[in-house]
Amino acid sequence: MSQASQHGKWTLSSSDDDNDDPLPSASNNNSPLLFGSPPPDQHTSSESNHNYPKIGSNFHQPKHDPDPPPSIEVKPEPKSDTVTAAPPISIGSEARHAAHASQLKPVKYDSNQSSPFLAGKRKKDEDSISGWALSDSDDDDKDKGQSSGQKDPPPKRSNPKLKKAKVEERPPSPHGRTYYIDEPDDFFETSVPPVNDTYRFYLNKVTGLEKRYNTGALHIKGELILSLNPLSFFNYCFDIAWMLQQYPPEFRDKPVLIVHGDKREAKARLLQQAQPYSQVRFCQAKLDIAFGTHHTKMMLLWYEEGFRVVILTSNMIRADWYQKTQGLWMSPLYLRLPKGSPETAGESPTLFKRDLLEYLGAYRAPEITDWIQRIREHDLSETRVYLIGSTPGRYLGSDMERWGHLRLRKLLRDHTRPIPNEEKWPVIGQFSSIGSMGLDKTKWLAGEFQCTLTTLGKSSLRPDPPMHLVRSIKHPNCTSPPLVIVVPAGGSLPYSIQTAQKQIWLHSYFHRWQAETTGRSHAMPHIKTYMRASPDFTQLAWFLVTSANLSKAAWGALEKNNTQVMVRSYELGVLYVPSAFSMSTFPVQMDVFPATTPSTSFPVPFDLPPKRYSSKDQPWMWNIPYTQAPDTHGNIWVPS
């Protein structure tokens, strides 16, 4: 059948109509950037509660790769890492496991073929051993050498000292060897937080950007895990071998606790990853409600001087830290309280300590008990953000405001103030995944979630301001402009056509992802942010960075005539309100990078105002093919 609207036309078979609700899974299909036949630390994944498309080949190179300019040195791809790694296994659910296997037979984009699918079906199996497609010119050169009787030249001897160059630290790129040209020389050097620590909100570094767009951004190999003792990672996806490699070598044997939500086969694969590492322990989060996931992303980092909390949007996998737009909040270093301090000592004006302990207690897990006690013994009084978490369950009475969007509503009611002409202050939501919203906006989005996002103070007035939902697009004319999204990362933007065609009304809210201010327009946005902006988009009434996508599973949904709320998943984020910083509103920072000087303006990660979808724009959907033309790196997307 065909489903058409002003926001695009999609065709699907009638059998697809039945696949409305997502299948329960602890994890999902993976961003295919690092699939294939890599070293063990190259496996990755994405996340969602949606159906997982079976991927035949999600990224493919065009027939002819452009040669790099002769004046630019092309840097080689790295060899396998030196850290002992687990056997080659995929990460997460059975759906992701199947997607990993199908990645080994990629389909190439060939502009001379009438159909990219036909070109792919003729692809030789042996060409896919490398994990991504070779160009036809590569095949021809190989065949010519063999047919003429020429032998491959002996490998050049290299100075062993040169093998320690920074180039070896790069992840192999499916975009080809030229992808790393012009990468800043100090990309992998220690990341020191910029001078401005007012908000302690940072973007991750991204490969391939101009140096200024990474100046002040953070990378996991720098400040985040430097000089560590025991630490704990709460997350959705893990690549344990890669994760441990990010530590300084002298700290790689320190105890590590991994808090996850994997079950059954996915759990078995996660445990298999950890077999070579005796220092790794696990805590499985309880997920008793269908379709729920452990989606929280947090680090608890223990130092000799104290500990630090990092709440972020990145999975603990390689692709999430190099080639996507991600964000994080990093706490101050929390020092130990004097012995004999009362239990209420070390609390912040935002009650962050109380709320963090309550969130950790909701796991009801003995593996976390030691961390709870450690946090009680430390001073968190410098914290100026509010914690907003989600934990699975059905909640009644006052407990309804402990978690999810009702928790956000309460904080906005208690700690913000009404603004003149607030009906003109738009609400902005930016996310990577979309759940089922219902047949019309009144079912949840406008009837429930928007009521939370429009709350300002204790006023009973609930105006209906504009709502801008920022989502990456696939433009029907792929060559002008090219795909805004780099398609190998498309597996990290779950939104199925089965869900989309049942909520066409939602697409009228959609606005384009564009991030020229941070240099990240083409770095797939895995970050999740929500905010309330002034009509001229120069001020913010509040700002939230979180793991929570646009879904009822993440934020919760009212039930039984609004007398209880049901939350399916674990999520975590931090809320910034101006009153906690002795301000009335946050000025929006116009030039985010380079972040080298102090600023009280807030670094919004994308351009304001966002641009509304045109009549030709379509939201990216991960289970339909995009084959008419490649993206800016020559890749196409072919789920099967």
Image (cartoon, rainbow, N blue to C red):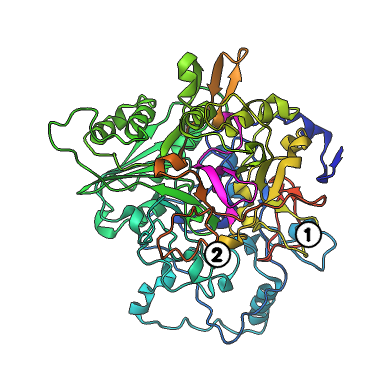
Q: Is residue 587 magenta?
A: no
Region of the chain picked out in magenta, as a range: 524-553
* Residue identified by numbered label 1: 116
Left or right of 116: which side holds 50? left
Left or right of 319: which side holds 637? right
Secondary structure found at label 1 = helix
Residue 96, horizontal then vertical, whole percent: 57, 43
Residue farthest toward the left in the current orientation of the protein:
339
User: Residue 561's mark?
Assistant: none
Q: What amino acid is labelled 2 in the image?
A: Ser
User: Residue 173's mark?
Assistant: 2
Residue 434, horizontal then vertical, whole percent: 64, 38
Q: Residue at x 83, y 37 (%)?
A: 13
Between the C-alphas of marks 1 and 2, the distance is: 22 Å
Q: Residue at x 23, y 32 (%)?
A: 345
Q: What amino acid is labelled 1 in the image?
A: Pro
Q: Nearer the viewer, residue 231 or 459?
A: 459
Q: Nearer the viewer, residue 205 or 114?
A: 205
Q: Quadrant of residue 167?
A: bottom left
The answer to whether residue 447 is above or below residue 241 is above
Residue 27, horizontal then vertical, whole percent: 54, 38
